[in-house]
Amino acid sequence: MLTREIRSQIDKLRDHFWSGGVSNPLTAVEQLTYLMFAKRLDDIQKLEESKAVGLKSQGYEARVIFPEGKDGLETPGFPDGGCPYDLMRWSRFKNEPPARMYEIVADHLMPFMRTIGGQESVMAKHMSGARLAFTKPALLDKLVQGLDEIPMDDRDTKGDVFEYLLAKIATSGENGQFRTPRHIIDLMVRLMAPKPTDTICDPAAGTAGFLMMASEYIRETHPDFWKDEALRKHFETEAFTGYDFDETMLRIGAMNMMLHGIEAPRISYRDSLAEGGGEDVGHYSLILANPPFAGSLDNESCSKDLLKVVKTKKTELLFLALFLRMLSTGGRAAVIVPDGVLFGSQKAHKEIRRLLVEDHKLDAVISLPSGVFRPYAGVSTAILIFTKTGRGGTDHVWYYDMQADGISLDDKRNPLLDEALLGPVPERALSEEEHAKNNLPDILARFAERDGSERGRERTEQSFCVPKADIVEAGYDLSLNRYKEVVHAEVKYDPPKEIIRELREMEGEIAKGLTALEEMLG
């Protein structure tokens, strides 16, 4: 967890961007991504050099990131064969004057980073567009010195710093993209409880928040899986896959995974709803996603296989068809959908809901308050949890009416409780008053009992179960309000004669007052 001092240091970096003429927060995060990557490369080489010294007697050969010699790119400051690779290391160029530092980073380090690990490496692909988006050496110097002062010696701190930066992206993206709040991601991951053997995918990965959180959860709950070589290799190379069609998001997502210990993240460019991607059919055991759900697609560019499942142009419905296609039999999904998916009356809406209920196993519908995604959007949404079976299995569907997530539901999104009491796993049990401000721990606890004690709850309560038969009878309407019962408090009124008597008494008092006033005025 970041200290207030570290948060203040990060905020200063953002202020430097603003005063330096970089006003787009997404651009600022991307630029800091490059610098954090540069610092990480130097840290890795330092670690390798230290290992080489300690294991010299065992013949250990250190991994070399910055080779000897020069890069061959001649610039005004390096006219003779280019810049020495050694000078591109963070620990070296951070001590250079601003103008010389800018030349090293912009004209030599950035081109070098675009080829790191070879032209075909994962990071080389994501760094293909890496370049500085500003021309002021003084700004680079402030950013480098500021980052250097932030202690990022361990994986958790690096990841937390990056997550804090992402949390400050306060502008909505195009095509319905906006960042899913970290505590909502944490809730969804904990509801699904991924294991080291899972193969997890987010087809609309964005900054890779779901994949990052899933990796952290596995580390937290299965700390010994590293001892199994097969599981460790699976975790590092195959367990996490993300797709996106935004190059900036791909770079940020890949860096997010790397800073959380995934050295070769499978974060790739793909328009998940377009043609292609057949190799992913039935491949994943778990899907976690908050796909974009604004607008419609041209049928010509959409996968014909998806259109066979549900004939529509609406992205939110096509993504649900995609999830079913990508999941292996027995695979599970926790995904965010707009409320319209739950009750839409169009044929495509009804068909996708019928598929989930009849052909697979719909487990839960968690209604989210409309302010959860502010300031990005005020749209009402829900979390759908389902299992791909291909042969039905829906018995009861568990519903929860989330009314508070621990943060105010306005554009300011201020915490309503101490930080230790926020999220799905607070430091202690919440009181009734605290629960009214943060429902997440209750959701986690009740979800675990959905096949047990939850079956006995009344529909007037915050959570309850609905039999499949009731859903079928309602035309596969999945909205919470269709099944939730509201108890109206009984209001007692006096008999009409008593009310009339009281009105006449009041009229009499008013008449007396008017008569007295007339007498006073003479």
Image (cartoon, grey):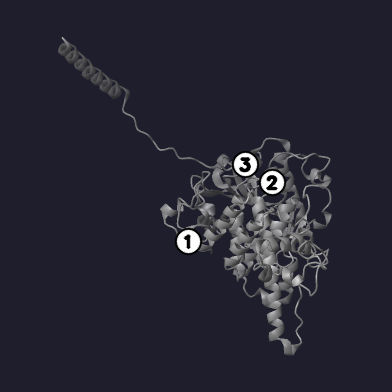
| Number of marks in the rendered image | 3
First in sequence: mark 2 vs mark 1: 2
Q: From the viewer's side, name the closer residue of 210 and 16.
A: 16
- Kind of residue at disc 1: Ala
* Vertical arrangement, residue 489 with respect to residue 90, above or below: above
Residue drawn at 48 percent across, 40 percent down: 486
Q: Residues within 10 Å of mark 3 (few under 14, many from 20)?
A: some
- Kind of residue at disc 2: Pro
Q: From the viewer's side, name the closer residue of 263 and 275.
A: 263
- C-alpha gap between disc 2 and disc 1: 31 Å
- C-alpha gap between disc 1 and disc 3: 31 Å
Residue 358: % across, % down = 70, 47
Q: Secondary structure at mark 2?
A: loop
First in sequence: mark 1 vs mark 3: 3
Q: From the viewer's side, name the closer residue of 100 and 388.
A: 100
Q: Is residue 362 visible to the viewer in this orientation of the structure?
A: no
Residue 458: % across, % down = 50, 47
Q: Which residue is mark 1?
A: 420
- C-alpha gap between disc 2 and disc 3: 14 Å
Mark 2 or 3: in front is 2
Residue drawn at 52 percent across, 50 percent down: 463
Q: Is residue 328 visible to the viewer in this orientation of the structure?
A: yes
Q: Which residue is mark 2?
A: 292
Would you identify the image quadrant in which residue 346 lies? top right
Residue 437: % across, % down = 46, 51
Q: Which residue is mark 3?
A: 339
